[in-house]
Amino acid sequence: MAPAAAAPSAAKSGKDTNFKDKEKSGSVRSSNIVAAKAVADAVRTSLGPRGMDKMIQSGNGDVTITNDGATILNQMSVIHPTAKMLVELSKAQDIEAGDGTTTVVVIAGALLDAAQKLLVKGIHPTAISESFQRAAAQAEIILQNMATPIDLANDEQLVKLATTSLNSKVVSQHSWLLAPMAVNAVKKVLDESRPDNVDLKAIKIIKKMGDTVEESEMIDGALIDQKTMGRGGPTRVEKAKIALIQFQLSAPKTDMENQVIISDYAQMDRALKEERQYLLDLCKQIKKSGCNVLLIQKSILRDAVSELSLHFLAKMKIMVVKDIERDDIEFYSNILGCRPIASVDHMVAESLGSADLVEEISTGGDGKVIKVTGIQSSGPAVSILLRGSNKLVLEEADRSLHDALCVIRCLVKKRFLLPGGGAPEMEVACKLREKANERGGAEQYCWRAFADALELVPYTLAENAGLSPIHTVTELRSQHANGHSNYGVNVRKGFVTDMKEENVVQPLLVSHNAIKQASECVRSILKIDDIV
Ligand code: ADP
Ligand code: MG
């Protein structure tokens, strides 16, 4: 009973409590750092072109194989709240830049390690946090100075950037196909009126199992990931007039609480006849507008289309596709050049989109997809058909292509590029160390620690490629000190070379954002002194 008795007495004396509190905040902080660092260590081996992939098994037995930092962290079941902050960090990088999701976590891990050492030296967390903020701001300037502007018309350069991003993926051997595809797709949806952003929603990737990734293609036209409804209706329509409707072709339902009681056969007969007439009228009106391909929005309130109306539409030789997702309406109305129609009264010829051919094609197995070609007034939107021999490859190909698309989008947002292979991180480290000399006291210490932490990126790239990390980093450091700011880890040749000559380049936004967000995240972890 002795410890229990001691606790209240310690609480009574103010001096003791203060002492205890300080100790507690120190231990909370260090346990937070340990937890977050554990997460960073877990993804570290995935960094770079020679990085390893992770196989993640979810609770329901689904297996994912990926190299993408954001995906790994997202699927890991992390419990500790600060470890979760790293998951969020990677997600934030994914949203903002789309690539560099492993890098950001590796940097955050290194900065946490640095912070822990500084704390042990007795530097106050707030001082560390503020120094890190200033160092990160300085890093931004250094990166900007080493970046080279890029012209969006330079396709060759853009393909190189997309290739770098695909290098580290499982599907890297297909980057000759996927990289130009990403560039073309983004260019196609580039909006003149909003020149500094790209809406990636306008690029629809449709995944179909079967064949290899090499058979993937960007479609000159549109793809709809649905089957036709059949029932004897056409599966191939030439000179198509496409309508995208948001109303249902089924009998209306009563309100929640109401019911219709039918007591004899005559009444039932009348009700059925009325339903038939109602649906027939709807179908006739659709036919009258000239429509011969009907896309119906998914409906949760009642059936989007009933058997009876399907029968009528089939007789009228109208192709029917149902279950178009609400979120996809904008995409399809853009790409097909048709206007979404909310009520049958608005069913007019002007709302329809025209295409030379709409046909259902088989993608192997029972996979089907509807292909629309020769669209007359297609807006800025593209469809990509992605193939893969199994689900794991297909999913990873999708994520990798997404990264490549994001890289091109980054360039549209910020038209500068940097050499890859750890060159930007090393350059920032070298320049920061120089700048640190101009600072005094603890600040200098913190800046040096910040600089050293960034070296973990080239270190890890070398380590993952089976090179000697220490040799590589010291060699790299001396090259950068001699003004060779483009030198990075050449994983193919196994030593340090000019990454630009090696065609390994990446967008400024990715590196810039990674350093900025990682230091923000570390600062907020440092500021936590208790978990309640
Ligand atoms: P992230 O999820 O952070 O993008 P990656 O696994 O894609 O992580 O690795 C990105 C890192 O790999 C970047 O630092 C990039 O410069 C580097 N990298 C990519 N391709 C090469 C290459 N061919 N040689 C050296 N480094 C490369
Ligand atoms: Mg990447």
Image (tube, rainbow, N blue to C red):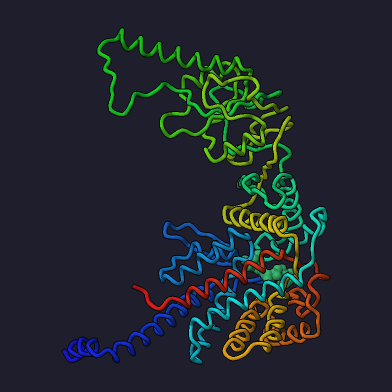
The quadrant of the rendered image in which ligand 2 is seen is: bottom right
Q: Is residue 158 left or right of residue 289?
A: right
Relative height, residue 442 to residue 407 (above, below): below
What's the residue at 72%, 58% (across, down)?
411
Q: Is residue 264 left or right of residue 173?
A: left
Question: Quarter-wise, where is residue 78 in the image?
Answer: bottom left
Frontmost residue, 54 versus 244 = 244
Q: Is residue 473 left or right of residue 343?
A: right
Give x and y (percent) for residue 239: 71, 23
What's the residue at 52%, 27% (across, down)?
342
Relative height, residue 385 to residue 129 (above, below): above
Relative height, residue 157 to residue 102 (above, below): above
Give x and y (percent) for residue 475: 75, 86
Give x and y (percent) for residue 235: 62, 27
Q: Quadrant of the N terminus?
A: bottom left
Frontmost residue, 445 versus 474 = 445
Question: Quarter-wise, where is residue 350 in the image?
Answer: top right
Work out which residue is located at the far top of the displayed protein and give it: 266
Question: Quarter-wise, where is residue 422 in the image?
Answer: bottom right
What's the residue at 71%, 60% (across, down)?
414
Q: Is residue 501 visible?
A: yes
What's the residue at 28%, 24% (across, down)?
258
Give x and y (percent) for residue 441: 59, 91
